[in-house]
Structure formats: structure tokens, C-alpha cells
Amino acid sequence: MKHTVVCSALLILTALLMASCGPSATQGPMAWLDQPLDGAKLPLEPQELTAHASDADGVASLEFYVNGALLVRSPAAGEMLENATAGWNPSAPGVYTIAARATDSQGNTGPDSVVIVTVGEVEGSPAPSPAVPPTEEIVTQETPSPRPPSSPGPTGTPRPPTPRPTTTAPTVTPPRPSPTRPIATATAPARRAEIAYFGADPSTINFGGCSTLSWGVDYAAAIYLDGEGVYDHDTRQVCPATTTIYTLSATSAGGDDQATATVTVIEEPTPTPIVTAVVVDNIPPYVSDLDADPASIMEIGSQCSGKPTTVSVYAEDPSGVAGVRAYWTLESQSGQVDMTPQGGGVYKAVLGPFDISAPPGNLLVSFVAWDTVGNSTPYVGPITVAVTSCIG
């Protein structure tokens, strides 16, 4: 009876153990962070995060978290074993908690794989403790106590138990560690980096304006905007002075991808210079309407005082008439007189009276006009004024 109860208890315990070890329909995939390792010290520059996950229902996606915030979600192909990579650009030195989480094709999410890393130089970080060499351990096998006599057999004569010999294990010296080969694990091929979208809004701006670049990248180990490391899903404001083409590059072990976005700048129109026409005046004044009043005068004599004459001309010029002069000759006499402007382009001068030796004679008058830029006419005329004898 006792033997039967013991066997039944063993069978129940075995069934419970097998049930607890069997796969659960709600248990999600197991995820492992391959890079970086726990406790790693990383430089302050763009980093590559790598993880893989396994699940009998197939892995649907892997997610990367930094300090509890979702960095990127990478869709998977639904195979039993999947891996993913993501680019991470730490913003500042510090201690970061990085986690990887996987979801299977049934929507079940597995536990996080978590590592803690240090980025850059962190003030006050503790120095690593020196390694303590392993100590030798003495293993001693205990002597079993004698079992009590069993129930008497059919003969009724009990047999005394035979005591087991006591043995002491020798001192064990740990052997020197020998190089071990890494255990190869099945890894799915790395996927090619994919730029899901990259564009500028607005794509055309006026001079002095700004545009916003936005992009989304999957499966990339590193991402660069015109050579500068950036996050996989991000935006940036740009204010170019001229039309500019921006280049986004994504790299991965499975292949690279590249895309461009153009921001067209409408530049301010160049002001057209106002050209003032300069008229070069190289023409002398126009002179006309030469006249003498009276046209006949009397000389100076013993019995008479003589009479003068008034000469006049009309002169005009686009630059303006600066002056008009009258030149006269009578027998061996000659002279010149600056004429007075009368308005309306008319200039006048009074000539005489004259004293001549052999009257009658002719007074010849010519005119020269000049403008404000230095152009002058040749002699215009002459006009003739008769000079008669004095009749006393």
C-alpha cells in the first residue's frame, strides 16, 4: 500500500513538472541584445544596436527602447529566428538603459532584454573593482549515517547493515582556463537599410525663409544627413540662402540606401539700375533775326552830335545761352560789345555814334554766341549799317 501511494505521488509530480516546462500559448518571444553588451563604455557618437529573437509562432517585430522610450520598431518576416539593427545617436554623455522586446505573430510580447551602458565621460562614475582571483575549494564527502534495520524478512532474522567506508575528497585545484570557441548561433541575414520617406516642406521658399526636412529610416545601423549622424525618425529645420540639395544616407550590413530632397529658394530680384540718359551737347547756340535799328546813322561832325544804332539777335540753346557778343568794323576802326539779354532769347547792344574821316561809310556788325557747356558759334553776319556825313 505504501509503495502504491509513493508511486502515485511521483507520477503527479512528474506531470506537474512537464506542464510547467511546456510552452505557453501566451508566452511571447525571447529577445537577446547582441550589441552593445551590458556594462559597455561607448564613445559619444552614433551607435549600432543589434538584437535577435526566437519564437515558435514566428517573430513579427522587434523594438528597441532607450531609457524606457521607444527608439524604433522594426518589422520582421515572421520566421522563428529574426534579428534587427537600429541606429542610435546619444544626445549627451551619461548612463543609458537599452532594452530589446519582441512580439510574435499571435500578438504576444516577450520579456525585455536589458543592458546598461555608459556613453562618453561621466563625472563621478565609480572606478572598476580589481578582479579577485578564484580561491581553491576543498570538497569533503560526508559519511552517511547507518540506516535503521529494515523490517524482518520471512525468516524473522534481521541482517545488520554494513557501514559504508568514509572517504575524503582530495583538494581540487581549479585548472587554468583554456581558450574556448564561441558557440555559433543561427542568425538571420541582415536586412538592407530602407529610407521610408525623406522630403522638405515646403519644398520652395522665398529668400530668407525656412523649410522642414523630415525622414524615416528602417533597418539601418547608421544614418547621416549630409555627413552628420542623425536619428532614424526625425525632423530638422533648414534656412538655405540658395537652392540646396540635401542627402540622407543609411547604412547596414545588408546594404545601404540613399535619398535626396531639394529646397528651392526664390531669390530676391536684382534691382534694375535707373539709367539717366545723358545728352551730350556739342552743338553751339542757334542765332537768327539779326537786325539794326536804325539801319542808317549820321557820323559825329562839327555841326552835329551823330546818332547810334541798336543791333539785336535771337539766340537759343538746349544747354542754355551763356552770352552773345557783337563785333563791329568801320573803316580802320573796330570793336566788340557784350549784348544784353532782353528775355525770350533776344539780345541787344547799342553801337555809335562814330567819327569817320571820309564819310559816307558802312558799319559792319557780326555776332558770336556761346552756351553753358562751352560750344560757340562762328561769326554770324555781318549786317550793314550806313554811316552818313554830318549835315550841319
Image: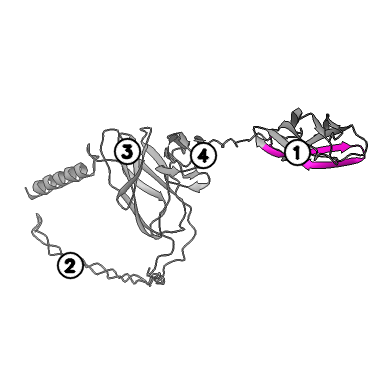
Magenta region? 318-341
Q: Nearer the viewer, residue 24 or 6?
A: 24
Could you say whether the residue bearing mark 2 is in a helix, strand or loop?
loop
Find residue 55 and report its image quarter: top left
Side of 6 where 261 appears, left or right = right
Q: Which residue is label 2 attached to?
A: 146
Q: Is residue 321 magenta?
A: yes
Q: Residues within 10 Å of mark 2 (few under 14, many from 20)?
A: few
At 85% from the left edge and 40% from the top edge, which residue is drawn? 301
Residue mark closest to the camera, 3 vs 1: 1
Residue mark closest to the camera, 1 vs 2: 1
Residue 350's disc number: 1
Of the residues shown, which amino acid type is indicated by label 1? Val
Of the residues shown, which amino acid type is indicated by label 3? Asp
Q: Which residue is label 3 attached to?
A: 55
Residue 378's disc number: none
Q: Which of 265 and 126 is in front in this view?
A: 265
Could you say whether the residue bearing mark 3 is in a helix, strand or loop?
loop
Answer with mark 3 or mark 1, whichever residue precedes in sequence: 3
The answer to whether 197 is drawn above or below residue 45 in the figure is above
Answer with mark 2 or mark 4, whichever residue precedes in sequence: 2
Of the residues shown, which amino acid type is indicated by label 4? Tyr
Answer with mark 4 or mark 1, whichever residue precedes in sequence: 4
Determine the CA span between mark 4 and mark 1. 88 Å
Of the residues shown, which amino acid type is indicated by label 2? Pro
Residue 246's disc number: 4
Tell me which colouring the rendered structure shows. Answer: one colour
